[in-house]
Image: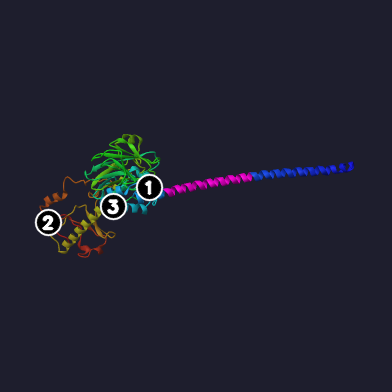
Amino acid sequence: MDGWRVHAAPYMHILGAWGNNTAFRNSNDDDDDDSLLTALILLVAICGTIVGIGFVFTMIFACVQLFKAVRWRLFGVDENGVSERMRDQMLSDEDSRQSYELALAFERQYPYGSINTQLTPEQQSLIRERGVDAWEFVVNLEVNALLQSKTDVLFMGGENCVQTNLPLPKANSVYYFEVKIVEKPADVNMWIGMATKPYPAWRMAGWNKYSAGYCVNNGIVHQNSPFKGTRIGEQLFVGDILGIGYQPRSGVVWFTRNGRRFKAIVSGMLYDLFPTISADGPCSFSANFGQRGFVFIEANVKRWGLGPVEGAMVPPPVYGANQNTILLETAVASSGEEDGDDNEEDDDVALIETSRRVRARAARGGADSSSTPMLAESTIIEIDDHARSPRATEPQNIQRSSRRPQGIHRPPQYQKEDPIAAQLLEAGSTSLEPVVSYRNKHPELLESPSASDIEEHTPGTSSLH
């Protein structure tokens, strides 16, 4: 019995170790199962919370929509909080009601974001080149207005609205511009503000969604609705200047009158906004986007204009600054050469006419000495086969008085004594044709009389042979 125990002791030890390992593994498996179950319960709880929150928000949204529908049906109040009674009071005539209904249809057809209104790379490049001059008002065909300059507009009558070609930037913290009332009758209403694009061309600024406008007739600011407004300012008259400041990071809009800032503000304007001016009658205004000094001094000091005063484009040179330049000297030299060529052609034509008259007189058989053509003894007429025309050859030391030197525009130097007049006095005649000496290089160019009939003569000869 004792020997069996001695021989079985190693095996019992092995069996005991195996049993201990099995129990340890079973305990580890139980721990893994517990961790997996805990993670699963946590995931279900999170999903349930998300679903519950979404269900709550859905129910709230449904209740709000139901309340709006019930309010519209029971009390006649629309989504903007305007009752049917107020709407009927504001839209008393048929034109106003039709304008309002068309504006609602326009909002449904062109919601915010339907077109890209952000600054494109081309527009940003234009701003860098031109600076603040890149902004200008755009007058469409459907607007009854006249664009007097980039920033000056004249409304001709009716309900009209104009906007700029570029929106307000968003790089800086504040942007500011001013509008001066140039002409406005007392019965014409005018709104100055900002709005998104597209915007109805017949609606006032602040009457439609995503817009805000200051009515200069009563100082009331309208935002997104023509029925509700807040009086934050004063009435403006002809010559007054209304300023508008915009903070793109917070969406805050504020106003100034003749350099004095109002305390009240308009918030929630986080859109791509364009300066917008509208009126319901004939009037005119002038806008200042920073191309000149503002009336509001703080805007000048902090440079709140829409862009730099001068862009990267080099301005044209000052008048008269191109004197004594290489380009100007080259142009003058080329023009002098052209003038010289023209003068040479005129001289050739004159010499051709003289030779024709000489040949005509020779053909008639001669004439007396008083009518004989006379030239200076040093002048010789040559027949050139290249030009095919008579050309006067003068001594080398005598320059043509009719040809101007290259690069210098000066009048010709006239002689103090006229040699032609001196010859007239010597001959005692009122008309004088010079004596011509011919040197015929090509006799075949002369038809009649023959080349042998024309010889060199002195002023004392009486006829041509």
CA separation, marks 1 and 3? 38 Å
Q: Is residue 15 left or right of residue 216?
A: right
Q: Which mark is residue 370?
A: 2
Residue type, label 3: Arg
Tags 3 and 2 in contact by the CB under 8 Å rule? no
**Lower sequence index among marks 1 and 2:** 1
Crowd class of label 1 (few under 14; some 14 to 19; many from 20; radius 10 Å): some
Mark 1 vs mark 3, foreground winner is 3
**Lower sequence index among marks 1 and 3:** 3
Q: Which mark is residue 123?
A: 1
Would you say the magenta stretch is mainly helix, strand or loop?
helix
**Lower sequence index among marks 3 and 2:** 3
| Percent of width and height locating residue 22 | 74, 45
CA separation, marks 1 and 2? 84 Å
Which of the image's four quarters has the C terminus?
bottom left
Q: Which mark is residue 455?
A: none
* Element class at badge 2: helix
Q: Which residues are magenta?
A: 35-63
Q: Quadrant of residue 11?
A: top right
| Percent of width and height locating residue 66 | 41, 50
Residue type, label 1: Gln
- Is 192 rendered above or below residue 301? below
Residue underneath mark 3: 97
| Percent of width and height locating residue 6 | 87, 41
**Residue nearest the observer in this picture, 174 or 20:** 20
CA separation, marks 3 and 2? 103 Å
